[in-house]
Image (tube, rainbow, N blue to C red):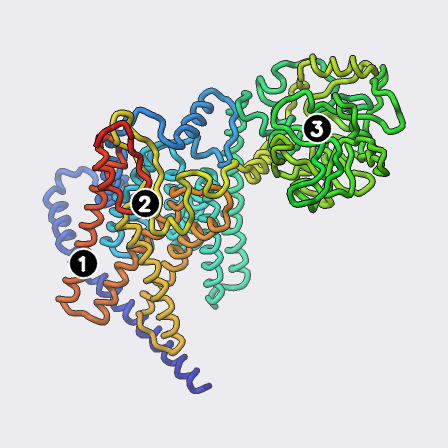
Amino acid sequence: MKAEGMDNEVRKRKSREKRTKSDDMSEESERLQCEKAMEPIDNNLEKYHVKNAEKIPCQEESHHSFTVSIEMDLVAWTLFLLAFLTRTFRLSQPRDVVFDELHYGKYVSMYMRNTFFFDQHPPLGKQIVAGVALLSPLTYKLLQALRMNRWTALLGGFLIIFDNALLTQSRFILMEPILLFFTMLGLVLLVKFHRTGLYTPLWFAYATGAAIAFTCALAVKYVGFYSCCLAGFSILRNIWKRLRDRDVSDWQIILQTMTIGTIFTVIPMAIYMSVFYVHLNVLHKAGPHDSIMTSAFQASLDGGLASIINKQPIVISHGSQVTLKPTFGRPCWLHSHPHTYPIKYPDKRGSSHQQQVTAYSWKDVNNWWIVKRPTRNDLVVGDEPDPIKHGDEIHLVHGLTARALNSHDVAAPVTPQAQEVSCYIDYNISMPGQLLWRVEIVNRNEEGDIWKAITSHVRLIHVSTGTALRLSGRQLPDWGFNQHEVVSDRVVVQPSTVWNVEEHRYTKTDDQKERERELVTREMIPLTRTNPSFLRKFTELQLKMLWYNDGLQANSHMYGSTPLEWVLMDKGIAYWVDKTSNGQIHLLGNIAIWYSGTFSVIVYLALLAFYLLRRRRLCFDLPDDEWEKFQLVGELLLGGYFINYLPFFFTERALFLHNYFPALIFKILLLCFVIEHMHTLLRLFFNRPIVLHLSRLAIFAWIAVVLYVYRKFIVLSYGATKLSAEDVINLRWKDTWDFILHKKIPV
């Protein structure tokens, strides 16, 4: 074994020496060629200066002249122009709202009116809605940065331009093209950052640019987080490789790591928070989505809760009439009504048959509750209010039915692992009421120990069982009028157990009939305007965006699809259909590119397994530089594909084909590398002209197929061609493609 190890070391040392000599010879050869090429230029320049010596008054001035050299990559510019033309051709058509443009166009208009809106994705994409024809040349630049040849890089840009799905998506006010643009820009700058000398101006510029680009991708849609993870892995992998360099001391490694860590944490945090700072400052007016936010957030908007300001009390006291809203849950209010829980549930479980307590999504008179001291019988707030403080025990009396909030060791109707919450009815059957609730102010470090309307976040702890009042997030059946379930949970510390008072007024009469009349007739008037800090509003908005559920369950949309269906493009999305014909816009990719990309993933994985097994047996099939490139492509492109694809298998909401686009880009790039790598293998092991010519011919034939498919389905990208039913049926290459046909339009 030792001899084998020594032989291995000798072999590796000889390989390194051979490679060093080869590199030196290559550099010397390039230097000689450059000098030889420069000789006639230098001679001509010398002749020029001698000939024109009399015409130049002062030769020294020429040494101090300022020279600007401009380099232009004609291939990149050609790709840009081609992408720009295909994306802007007939851009004014159709003159209707297309698919999700309904949302994003509305968001842009709200920006222009400074009106607050809520979206589960970050706001940068809506702020900069713009064309991304630069995506194709960025792909070209990225493949070049990964040391692929110019033809491979050109092929990558070509495939991005001639994929029908990417063409369709980039023609409308949608977020995916902007997300892809920032992702590709970040990758280009990251690769250049890895290959630039440490602490040079370019090194800092590339690092800063990559950090900004990846943060912008995250700030467009949260799926950009996956590309940020890929960048983080690449950076850590690069640092790990430097640990093997014995010329670098431990302190240098530590300093480099700290510098890189600072750049890729501080800058992204600053950029991300700046995007939301602009967002929250621009959208300062009340809008249609106010109810999703907490009461304090709403009251900070112009025309929100403060639009009908009245001198409302702030301090919650004995006798306060309040509405309670989940601070971090869906927009709804604690609610009760005279109806009771059913005696038996469908699963044969029994209930308490007490009065139902739910959460209701609309403003309603049954949302009102009265805070009562257990030691007092009246409900009137006198001249000196009796404030409720942190740790006080209270009763919550339902305003219209006058029954107190109750909980007990009975399973909740839909969430049986939690306790039922009810309004207590005395049936005289040895089931006493357990009506005490303890007030715990969660943010008392900021708001103090006194319970305040809007600003105080409270947990209501059931004294008898130690459980907390919680919005379960589930919906009650028909007997509960499909309202939201409220339970009492043993897990106290969780966001859904936090509530706050939204509407508030003092009870002025102890007469039940008069009080009911007051509750029914008086308008729900909010409190005065609040002024929460940017950090507080930013934090609340982040929590809402992360936990928000848009209500679309998996496969609930007719054009929803699963990750397994994306790979072979089994399902598209109908974006728009013409009213007078069967002409339509349908999101559908270039099947030749998509299938080839899927095949390239399989080929790469097979080659990777083959090479690794061979290298374990000390059989090194690839030159060191080619193996290093093969590994780098695996880390960035194959890793980028899987990190942007696999997480969707664990997503419960409805998914669509466009969710696959970030992974698709990496798959297309990997396809380009596999084509180049197969050509490299042919040159290494079958270096015969006929073989190389046949391989090139096969590639050109495949490109012709790509162009044919693109041309065939381009009518579904632009939507400008009037189609008959027969035309649409002829485009239906797969039974799972759901195109739209007008019944009233004849074939």
Cα distance, mark 2 to mark 1?
26 Å
Q: Nearer the viewer, residue 391 or 460?
A: 460
- Could you tell me which secondary element the residue under label 1 belongs to? helix
Dot label at residue 698: 1
382 shown above or below 579: above
Disc 2 or 1, which lies upstream in sequence? Answer: 2
Q: Could you tell whether 35 is left or right of 103 in the image?
A: left
Q: Could you tell whether 688 is left or right of 566 in the image?
A: left
Q: Which image quarter is the C terminus in?
A: top left
Q: Position of residue 99 (x, y in %)?
A: 38, 32
Q: Position of residue 409 (x, y in %)?
A: 78, 43
The amino acid pointed to by label 3 is His
Task: Give the residue pinned by disc 2.
Answer: 138
Cα distance, mark 3 to mark 2?
63 Å
Q: Nearer the viewer, residue 727 or 180?
A: 727
Cα distance, mark 3 to mark 1?
74 Å
- Residue 693, picture quadrant: bottom left
Which residue is painted at 38% across and 63% down in the image?
631
Q: Could you tell whether 634 is left or right of 346 in the image?
A: left
Disc 3 or 2, which lies upstream in sequence? Answer: 2
Q: Are marks 3 and 2 in contact (CB under 8 Å)?
A: no
Q: Position of residue 597 (x, y in %)?
A: 31, 54
Report if residue 664 is visible in the image: yes
The amino acid pointed to by label 1 is Ala
The amino acid pointed to by label 2 is Leu
443 shown above or below 38: above
* Marks 3, 2: nearer the viewer: 3
Which residue is painted at 39% across and 54% down in the image?
196
- Could you tell me which secondary element the residue under label 3 belongs to? strand
Q: Nearer the viewer, residue 479 or 648?
A: 479
